[in-house]
Amino acid sequence: MFRLIARAIIAVVVNALGLLAASYYIKGFNLNNDFREILVLAAVFTAIYFILRPIVKMILGPFLVLTLGLGLIVVNAAMLYLLDLASKNLMIDGVGALLEATLLLSVLNFVLHYAEKE
């Protein structure tokens, strides 16, 4: 139980850092700079990532196999866009900013999951 809680806290911190990095480096990715709001936003994104993403991956399984896994970028972009729609503290202007932020957050989450396995 403690390991699950620690994993969730680490995921929230990594996603918060990823959202901050995206707002700093990606033009068109605007984030409210209030620390508490960023943590809440990261917690919501982590919940979406852990709960909704596996369901969507299971439904779109054949599509993901046909695209050799590149369809995961679309799934991750949809999760980030859902967060954009649900939050007033995050504004993503354009598909380019959405894709760049998706790639950044995907790489960070990949590194996090790889580090957890070792």
Image (cartoon, rainbow, N blue to C red):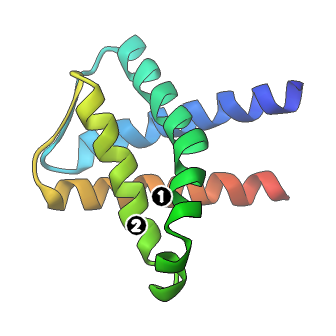
Residue at horizontal 14 percent and vertical 49 percent from the top: 27
Q: Is residue 99 above or below residue 48?
A: below
Name the mark on residue 42: none
The residue wearing badge 1 is 106
Q: In the visual, does 79 lie left or right of 108?
A: left
* Residue 98 drawn at (x, y percent): 24, 54
Would you place residue 93 above or below residue 9 in this image? below
- What residue does disc 2 label? 73
Local packing at callout 1 (Cα closer than 10 Å; few below 14, some 14-19, many 20+) is: some
In the rendered image, which quarter contains the C terminus? Answer: bottom right
Q: Is residue 16 above or below residue 104?
A: above
- Asked if the residue at tag 1 contacts the one at tag 2, i.e. Cβ–Cβ closer than 8 Å, the answer is yes
Counting residues from the start of the chain, the first of labels 2 and 1 encountered is 2
Q: Is residue 84 left or right of residue 2?
A: left
Q: Position of residue 17 (x, y in %)?
A: 46, 37
Left or right: residue 75 versus residue 118 is left
The kind of residue on which mark 1 rests is: Ser
